[in-house]
Amino acid sequence: MKKIFLFLGIFSLLSLADGQVLAASLQITTKSLPDATFGLEYDKQIQAQDGTGTYTFSLVSGALPPGLNLSSDGKITDRPTKDGVGQPPFEFTVRVVDESTGVDNQDLKIRLLIQQLKITNPADDSVPSGTVGEPYPEFTFAASGGVPPYVWANPETTGARLLSSFGLQLSQIGELSGTPIKAGTFSFGVSVTGDPVLQDYQNRAFRSFTIEIKSVPYEITTVSLSPGEINKPYTATLSAHGGAPPYSWSIAAGSLPPGPSLSTNNFFQGIISGTLAEEGNFPFSALVRDTEGAELVKPFSILVEKVCQCSDGTSCGSCKAGSPPLYCDGTNKTLINNPTCTDGTATPVTPPPGGQFPFGKLEVDWPNSPMGTKLTGESLTNLIQYLYEWGIGIGGFLAFIALIIAGFQYLTSVGNAGKMSDAMSRIRSAGMGLVLLFGSFLILNTINPQLTDLTMPPPEQLINSGWDFDVESQQLSSPENKPATCNSVIFYPEPYFKGMPVLKNGINKYQNIEVKSMVISGGCSVTLYDHPNCDQNSLGSYDSLSNKEDTKYNNIGTGGATSFQCVDVSQM
């Protein structure tokens, strides 16, 4: 029995001793870490074992590569920065503790590498094509890897040409630009280098590329040159394309107007600039020469006109070259055609009694509407009525014609259901058009009856205030009590000057109505301004005009002591 107890005691002691020997202590099992790469995320876990509870990691000494961080749970994460590129491996010591008394330290290191720099755009070995004489389309090289910022260059290498030899250039940020000057397919080299602080073969790259430069016809593209005005600055541009730019410009024949000169700008264009000093038309031939000596000649001309002015209201302005002489209307300060204005000097025109010509200002003589309304532009009502009468006239006519055609189609399509249906649709559409026209008439008439007044307006009074004109009888007469303006009666049957638009006032305003009988009460002195029907040798009676060729007057008579004089305005 004693032997049994002794055996158990020895076994227990041996077991206890063996337990103390085999019991594990806390330790870091990660003995090394992989390299980090600049620009890429890093995420590695430091492992530990044989501790109690939760482990807590910390950095005891040394330093991680810039940009990386160690968390309390043992993870090294984040993206390394370029500050550590090119440096020796970063050595550091990591400590781990558990929730008991366990602790362990481990020396580790991380080396910071870079990716090989490479050109990624374009993906193949060619770049977009260009055209001689035209700006190269925008294109930018791209790269990845290495350490930015990148610096681009176009080195001269064996079998490759410099971009400048055919008109292009490469900027340091990788932009390809310029204007090609030669046609063909060319090879050129492109290099890219990363941050110069890192002299490493992985921080630079080189590739060869090809580019196609297309040709265009060599020609002067400017069609014509704009006119200019004397004593004013003038600028015009001559352009060409094709050939082998850059170009130079000169005058081959003829001469520019006095004042301007021809030069070549930085865009290979011919620039004509200067102040025009002489009036006239100046023909010349422009010559363009490219870098290979090829020449083109094209004729041009510059018309130099005088400047039209209208300041004092009495004198003629300097009339534009090739234009009719101009007269300055003193009332409106506008230039009008006037044959009495020559060589920039005004020939005085004697106004009729009263001091003003009766026709007032000149305006465009628009055709009357189908109902006879004249477009005066004096009010919105006039404009609406004018446009409405044209609209209702044209719209009604078209709707009526459409109705007739559709009705004829319907009658000739009996037995054909499809065509009869189409015809009936057109009849309904035409009928709807007529209904809409009538409806618009009712709406406008409700708003303002004047807008829908479709009656033919009577001619306006044709002479000075106080005289009456009866449309039906065509009688022109004075009232019983003669107005104070009796001695300044004026009548204009035709446009005042040749070559002018038809005047708004005057007999010609209403479809050339002729005065077949005009009776003027006695006791007045009447002046007729006519053109060209006056006969200076037969003054004194209106009857003297009744037999004149082309006259618009018949049976004109005066009563009492009325006297008459006729002034031929063509002689004024």
Image: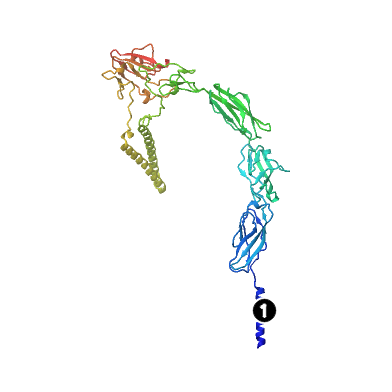
Question: Residue farthest to the top?
Answer: 537
Along the horizontal axis of the image, is 471 left or right of 164?
left
Along the horizontal axis of the image, is 229 left or right of 48?
left
Name the quadrant containing residue 505. top left
**Residue 380 position within the rendered picture, expressed as x and y whole percent measured from the top left:** 36, 33
Along the horizontal axis of the image, is 211 left or right of 493?
right
Residue drawn 72% across and 43% down? 157
Name the quadrant containing residue 91. bottom right
Question: Residue farthest to the bottom?
Answer: 1
Residue pointed to by mark 1: 14
Quadrant where the N terminus sits is bottom right
**Residue 25 position within the rendered picture, expressed as x and y whole percent measured from the top left:** 64, 69
**Residue 411 position within the rendered picture, expressed as x and y whole percent measured from the top left:** 38, 43
Residue drawn 43% across and 19% down? 314
Q: Which residue occupies the foreground of this view, 104 or 190?
A: 104
Quadrant where the C terminus sits is top left
Q: Which residue occupies the foreground of this view, 206 or 225?
A: 206
Q: Which residue occupies the foreground of this view, 436 or 160?
A: 160
Q: Secondary structure at mark 1?
A: helix
Disc 1 packing (10 Å; few <14; some 14–19; many ≥20)? few
Question: Residue farthest to the left?
Answer: 480
Q: Is residue 546 visible?
A: no
Q: Is residue 4 visible?
A: yes
Q: Is residue 97 above or below residue 280?
A: below
Number of numbered labels in the structure image:
1
- Residue type, label 1: Leu
**Which scheme is used to colour this image of the protein?**
rainbow
**Residue 368 position within the rendered picture, expressed as x and y whole percent measured from the top left:** 38, 29
